[in-house]
Image (spheres, rainbow, N blue to C red):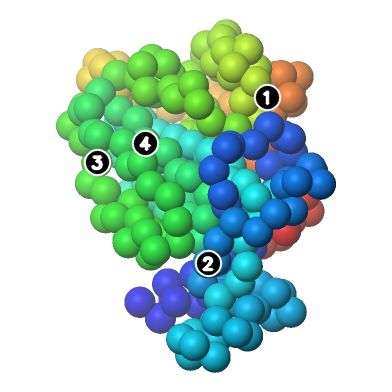
Amino acid sequence: MNSHQAILGKLQKRKIAAKTRKRGYHSGSRKSHKFGSSMEFSDFRAYQPGDDIRQIDWNVYGRTQKHYIKRFLDEQELSIAVYLDATSSMTKIQQKWEYAKALASALSFMVLSSEDRLFFSAVSSAGVQPIKRKGSVYSRRTFMEIQKIEPAAQSTNFLGCLKETLSKHQQLAVIIADGFEPLQDWESLFRKLRGLKQEFWLFQVQADEELTPAYSGDIKLIDSEIGTAVNVSMSPSILAEYEKRLKEHNEQLEILCKRYGGQYIFAPETRDLQSVLFRDLYAKGLVR
């Protein structure tokens, strides 16, 4: 729990910096690009660590002994969707699954603690109901709920399930997946997101044993999504060819993602989660 407290304290001070100028119509905690009448007073919200203390309304503090900040009509929310690949391909390797959940819960916490609107979906054929929430009051609860998600039974491919789950009313779609699906299927998704005028980020999470497998001899390979098995005799040359193809696939996926205006973040489960959240995203200008 102490480790959770440490990372939540850091996340609370960060905001997702979506580049889109399209905003929701409801009050939030971020500045829009509009001025004039939008600067009219709307209501108050509770002070959060990281807020500018100059914005505290001391008259309200005098009456309530609590710190509140004035909220204006120009502070409008973002609607952000977080899609976590919860199909068998992602959940069969425990460390990879836990890493992906930790990433999804951290990003969802950041969305809610910024008073933005969250649509979270653990995408699989199990039909788990998505989480739809708004506001920092739900941030910790949602963080813990995502951490506790259990893997579903064997399920079909991620992108096939995602097409049925995809929400059309978001400014930003955050996708957390291993990216093993065919490139043409990813391109179809990216094209659809661009057509919906949604900004999108792809976090590609892969396990160390997927990137550099250490197998040798005769083994049975099982497709985690459809359950079929094949016997293979592994050799150094076969492993080298596998690693080469995977590297090429990942590079092509990154190129495709960027071609359609998306942000690509490679997040192998061996990379420290805080480095991804507080270095990689900051370096790309995706959080502030």
Above/below status of 87 relative to 147: above
- Choose the circle earlier in sequence order: 4 or 2: 2
The reply to whether dot 1 and dot 2 touch (C-beta < 8 Å) is no
Amino acid type of the residue tagged 1 in the rendering: Cys
Q: Disc 3 marks which residue?
A: 151
The answer for how far apart the CA atoms under marks 2 and 3 are is 37 Å
Above/below status of 193 relative to 199: above
Residue 220 visible somewhere in the drawing: no
- Choose the circle earlier in sequence order: 1 or 4: 4
Question: How many labels were placed on the picture?
Answer: 4
**Residue nearest the viewer, comparing 172 with 78:** 78
The answer for how far apart the CA atoms under marks 1 and 2 are is 37 Å
Residue 20 position by quadrant: top right
| Badge number at residue 13 | none
**Residue nearest the viewer, comparing 155 with 220:** 155
Residue at image position (52%, 55%) is 115
The answer for how far apart the CA atoms under marks 1 and 4 are is 21 Å
Amino acid type of the residue tagged 2 in the rendering: Arg
Q: Disc 4 marks which residue?
A: 121
Residue at image position (70%, 54%) is 40
The answer for how far apart the CA atoms under marks 3 and 1 are is 27 Å
Q: Is residue 89 left or right of residue 151?
A: right
Amino acid type of the residue tagged 4 in the rendering: Ser
Give the quarter of the figure containing the N terminus: bottom left
| Badge number at residue 257 | 1
- Choose the circle earlier in sequence order: 1 or 2: 2
Q: Position of residue 32 (x, y in %)?
A: 73, 46
| Badge number at residue 45 | 2
Query: Which marked residue is nearer to the observer: mark 1 or mark 2?
Result: 2
